[in-house]
Image (cartoon, rainbow, N blue to C red):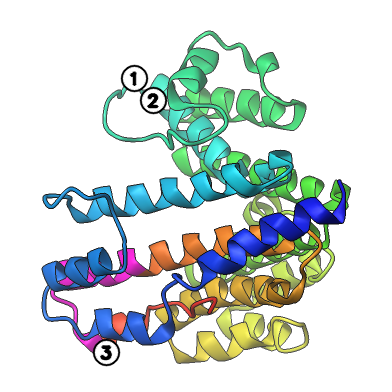
Amino acid sequence: MNELEYTYAVARVRALETSLLTDSVIDQLVNCKTPEQCLQILEEKGWGSNDANIDAEEMLKREEEKAWEVICDVAPDLSVFDVLSLQKVYHNLKAAIKAVCTDVRGGNIFCEDAKISGDEMMKIVENKEFSRLPANMANAAKEAYETLLQTRDGQLCDIIIDRAALEAISEAGRHSKDAIIRDYAESTVAIADIKIAVRGAKTGKSQEFMTRAMASCDSLNKNELIKAALGGTDAVKEYLGTTMYAGGAAALEESPSAFERWCDNRMMETMRPQKYNAFSVGPLVAYLFARQNEIKTVRIILTGKQNGFSDEMIRERVRAMYV
């Protein structure tokens, strides 16, 4: 792919970055008295469709669609973005296995914008045609399916598939020629492992459980992280303090919601340097991630307003913006 193609695509995305929500707009949304006031501000920013009766969930869904429409329109090579939607594909696998094994159907359980739709995944699982899936996913699907049938342990089913998703992301990162994809994959796996360690420390999970749940990555020592988790939350904080994820230790000291916010903000830090790279797919990946981040943040704010949370509680949960 030549630099001219990237230059054109990046120029298009640069123009669109001016319409991304800023921290000041997010603050304005937090200060709204009602969810309806939030929606009005977002409509004025061009969010949603032109339907005056659009509800919050429809608006957020439409924004997710718009983000992908932009990428599909400008990206010279869409295969680069497959890694960003891997977790949705694995989510559909998990949902299909649980639906088939428990015979509980219905409800909005699938990500319909995934590369393998919910309907297709249901057919694969119902017919046990796991060979139709990529090799790593097929192995995890068969193991999770048989485990859930035999043990009825939904959590064990979850960790089998979630770890397979992390390993698929890690593998995609290792084989990518694009630095942004390698960085995204490494950060995604590391942060997921840190979350597992924190939850494991709080709930007293065994070494076997955490070994099975975590995927390996380069920026953390998995065995050291598990050892720390077995020693409790303070030991996890101490270990993180020796790594490039020391900010997570400080966030854990503050509160659980501050830690969740740090996890997402740490991913944004990974993306932000791509602003200044005009000759690669980096700015396109960063733009898509920025859009997903602001949609997630708006959902947090709207949910907080709908449930009567104080502005202070909501503000503690909002994520840093890209611009």
Q: Which residue occupies 47% across, 36% down?
A: 113
Number of residues whose C-alpha sits closer than 10 Å to that of mark 3, classed few (under 14), some (14–19) or many (20 or more): few
Element class at badge 2? helix
Q: Position of residue 22 (x, y in %)?
A: 43, 80
Q: Is residue 253 visible?
A: yes
Left or right position of 114 against 317: right
The residue wearing badge 2 is 99
Name the residue carrying label 3.
312
| Dot in front, 1 or 3 | 3
State whether residue 110 is above or below residue 1: above
Marks 1/2: CA–CA distance: 5 Å
Q: Which mark sits nearer the N-terminus, 1 or 3? A: 1
Q: Amino acid at mark 3?
A: Glu
**Is 303 in the magenta?**
yes
Q: Secondary structure at mark 3?
A: helix
Magenta range: 298-311
Judged by its main secondary structure, the magenta piece is: helix
Q: Camera-side residue: 44 or 111?
A: 44
Marks 3 and 2, Cα distance to the nearest angstrom?
Answer: 39 Å
Alpha-carbon neighbours of circle 1 within 10 Å: few (<14), some, or many (≥20)? Answer: few
Left or right relative to 110: residue 278: right
Q: Position of residue 100 (x, y in %)?
A: 42, 20
Judged from this view, the residue extending furthest toward the top is 127
Q: Which residue is mark 1?
A: 103
Give the quadrant of residue 43.
bottom left
Callout 2 amino acid? Ala
CB-based contact (under 8 Å), mark 1 and mark 2: yes
First of labels 3, 2 by sequence position? 2
Residue 193 tag number: none
